[in-house]
Amino acid sequence: MEVDTEPQRIPELWFKDGNIVLQAGNTQFRVYGGILAARSPIFEDMLSLPQPPGESELVEGCPLVRLHDDPVEATVFLRAIFDLEYFKPFPAQTTYDIIRGCLRLSNKYGVDQLRVRALVHLSSRYRTNLADWDGANFYESSDPDSPKNRFVSEIVSWPYLSTLAQQISVIQLAQEVEATWILPYAFYRLSAVLDGNLEELICEADKFEINLSPEDLKRCLAGQHLQCRASTTDIIAAFASHPHEIHGCASISQCRKARLVAIETLQGMIPAFPCMPLGLWHDDDWESLEDMCPVCLASMQDRHQAAPQRFWNKLPEIYRLPDWEELEKNREAVLGSRWWLA
């Protein structure tokens, strides 16, 4: 029988010579069944099933297959399959929504090449190495024409996420596709966005119908406290616990005063960034210690450089996850050792 209603059709995915119509929600796509079957063993099985005579739904003479998928995700997934320019390999720029749609449905329908491509894009912002994380975060600029952004574009392929709902979404996505190496920094970002307001987590989850699993909620509740405390125990302590006198200091009183300035500066940052120990002190902040002698400045820089690394090393443990070594092995098993070239 012919279908009477006319749902929304996506022009980029409505091929006049297509031989099958897919429908997700109220959105239709006229595409090529043979290409879908070649890319996806799930679609191959679906399309090979014979339909009872007279019971097939038709749209413009083509069989209609209904998908139980989000229409937006189905759109980006199908565009990635039928338009080679739409979702290029890393480091081509893309968006989180495109990554999410491609990853969820390629994982569901067994489109392995597309799944790997989406995982590489997702992983570009969720690093397992602090040096790589530094490159992706401390050099990002709000100016789209900034040379720093051109540098970042070679490291990260999609824009920064700022909302709580988006951060929860990343954790859900990583758990769904078993991309465990994404999780430590994803939980870090969620806690940073929450700023200690756990009630907001519940309200936002209800508002957008997104929920952390009970286990992930426990991770967040326990880990956020430790992450916020690390701003004081790990980062400020790198300055405050310095020896009273550093061997070779050219001016003890002047350098002590400069160190106090650094501690006060950090303490002043904490109210604005209570759960961001990795973002409390940037390279530019060393300029405030220009009165410190070169010997003491070098000593403090060495000591402070070690503090973020110590925090980063224990980040998976804070959120009750396997250590970085195991997580990197998981990533390598899925994406290979040179994953950024996938």
Image: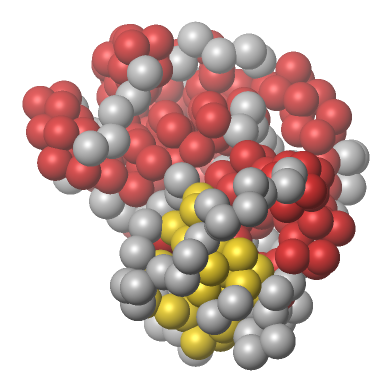
Colouring scheme, one of rainbow, by chain, secondary structure, one colour: secondary structure
Q: Could you tell me which residue is drawn at 53 percent across and 27 percent down? A: 175
Q: Could you tell me which residue is drawn at 37 percent across and 57 percent down? A: 25
Q: Residue 284: horizontal and vertical position, in percent?
A: 43, 61
Q: Nearer the viewer, residue 228 or 292?
A: 228
178 is higher (above) or lower (below) than 169: above
* Quadrant into which the C terminus falls: bottom right
For the question of whether residue 297 can be seen, the reply is: yes
Q: Residue 74: horizontal and vertical position, in percent?
A: 51, 59
102 is higher (above) or lower (below) than 19: above
Q: Nearer the viewer, residue 105 or 163?
A: 105
224 is higher (above) or lower (below) than 33: above
Q: Could you tell me which residue is drawn at 56 percent across and 14 percent down? A: 321
For the question of whether residue 299 can be seen, the reply is: no
Q: Residue 51: horizontal and vertical position, in percent?
A: 66, 49
Q: Nearer the viewer, residue 113 or 136?
A: 113
Would you say 78 lies left or right of 249 here?
right
Q: Residue 187: horizontal and vertical position, in percent?
A: 42, 30
Residue furthest to the right in view is 337
Would you say 182 lies left or right of 240 here?
right
Count up the numbered dots.
0
Q: Quadrant of residue 6?
A: bottom left
Residue furthest to the front in view is 54
Would you say 137 lies left or right of 280 here?
right
Q: Could you tell me which residue is drawn at 32 percent across and 72 percent down? A: 5
